[in-house]
Amino acid sequence: MYQGYFHFKESPFNQTPDPQFFFSTPVHQKVLDAVNQAVERGGGFVIVIGEVGTGKTTLGRYILQKVGGSLPVSLVLNPALSPGELMRTIAEDFSGGEIPAGLPPAPAVAELLARMPKGGILIVDEAHNLPRASFDVLLEWASSVLEGGGRLTVILLAQPEISSLLDNPAAKERLPASTVRVPLVSLSSAETRAYVGERLRRAGGGNAGPAFTDGGLDAVHRYSRGIPRLINTVCDKALLAAYVKESWSVDKEHVKLAVEEIEGPSLRDERRGQRFIRGVGVAGALSVVVIFAAFLAYQTSRQIAPGGVSDGAAGKRPAVHWNARVPDEDGVVRANSPEESAAAAAYTLAALWKRTPEDPSAFAKTLGDRPDFAAAARHLGLEANAVQLSRTAILKGTHPIIVSLLGEPDVITTVRILEERLGKDAADPALLARTRTRYAVLAEVHGTNAVVLDPLVGRTAIPVLVLLDRVSGDGTVWSQPPGDKGPAPRLVQERGS
């Protein structure tokens, strides 16, 4: 979404393990040196151990790219195979798909390798997922190849769980003394900075691309703890935040928005609660939980305007079914399920236009399983146009817009509101809050906050950054036909007048 704005040729923080974006540190160089030495001496084992997201797969792809043209390579991506399946996969890779006739896979590969002057390289990704029987067969086979004069370099890329396989007495006996184990650690603060800059450069940003400020890079490292996968995730979201705010640089505020989007409100609330409880001590923890829960219930029951002013008194709202076709005090026609949200959104937008359908039955028929908002507009004497929901359309385009939303940014709040309106004995509100697409009305944009009239939740103000990740497909704008003297939409900020 932001590639054109920042002049990137491709996404700089794509999670796909792309050797083009390989970033070398002294630890990575140690792995590459160990592989080169193993190849030169005729084979051996190099075992790379790292936590999830530390870049093991990207390292494997880089090694494959470097040696694939000069040495036969077998790459095992899914090692959860039986011993026979594992050896057949390796044999087919080394033989180009044709195993020598009359030989089972293991001897066949040994024979093939014996005929290769430089030998071959076997890379097993996610090697900790190898069944013990398959791991034992692999070690026995590799040992026999090396003892028989074959040249084979085995590279195992694994999470720390592989220690249960490596620490087995039989494995220790079979692994050659030259085996190299390298822990793939997370990046330091300086390496994180270099990593981000290198990915931006390789994506095409060059000197004209966006820059992360010192504060932004410090925030990236604090959140990611130097784990490349998390660096990619938070930087991608931070670039999106800068794009939404039309900023050319990425600072700590953009990173903060990114972290909030990644973690979601429920996780943030949980962490705040845990910190608060730890601060007051165990003796008062139960009282704190009760008070904190009551505070959250009070806060989320209020509808806050973009300027921070309460739109109404706190308290439980009465149940309003969309069939009443009457907006509540926030201008929202409520729905009790995602299935009803299309009709509720259409009635909400009709209320903004101060129009009612001459034929309510025909109007309702346009809003069934496959809502036709253009047909619904005609029943109100209006025209309809599809709008591509880009950043520009949301920030500067014509409002209000009927939009389709995926998921729910704040499931906990939604469930609480649905429980209040439906009762706790009704259909599972948590399921209703999470399932299927729902429709809502994007009423206005104030700065970087979008005012959304959501039939399931009510009136909310959410960051445009969040909305951009939630909208699905095109939106629909209603407008007056040429020459129509009817009233324009009544904007949200005018309600109550």
Image (cartoon, helix red, strand yellow):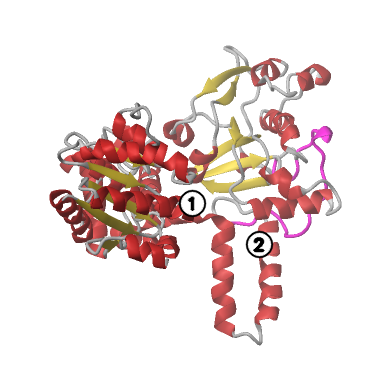
Q: Are marks 1 and 2 in contact (CB under 8 Å)?
A: no
- Rounded to the nearest angstrom, the CA distance separating label 1 from label 2 is 20 Å
Residue segment shown in magenta: 308-331
Q: Position of residue 440 (x, y in %)?
A: 64, 36
Please tell me which residue lies in front, 270 or 485: 270
Image quarter (top left, top right, bottom left or bottom right) of the N terminus: top left
Task: Using residue 245 as the reference point, say whether residue 115 is left or right of it.
Answer: left
Farthest residue toward the bottom?
283
Q: Regarding mark 1 in the picture, which secondary structure is present there? A: helix
Other-residue count near label 1 (Cα within 10 Å), few / some / many at <14 / 14–19 / ≥20: many
Q: To which residue does mark 1 refer?
A: 261
Estimate how packed mark 2 is, as few (under 14), some (14 to 19) or many (20 or more) residues with alpha carbons within 10 Å.
few
Is residue 287 at all visible to an observer of this figure? Answer: yes
Most foreground residue, 264 or 168: 168
Figure check: 321 above or below 362: below
At a point 60% along the width and 18% down the height, the residue shown is 384
Q: Tell me the chief SS of the magenta region.
A: loop
Q: Secondary structure at mark 2?
A: helix
Look at the picture and state if 24 lies above or below 246: below
Q: Earlier in the sequence, mark 1 or mark 2?
A: 1
Say which residue appears at 71% left-offset and 69% top-offset: 294
Measuring from the top left, give residue 390's x and y in whole percent: 45, 31
- Which kind of residue does numbered mark 2 sit on? Gln
The residue that disc 2 covers is 299
The residue lying toward the viewer, choosing from 272 and 54, is 54
Image side of residue 351 versus residue 183, left or right: right
Q: Identify which residue is drawn at 39% across, 61% down.
A: 223
Which residue: 26% across, 51% down? 196
In which image quadrant can residue 245 be found? top left
Q: Nearer the viewer, residue 225 or 354?
A: 225
Residue at the far front: name it: 102
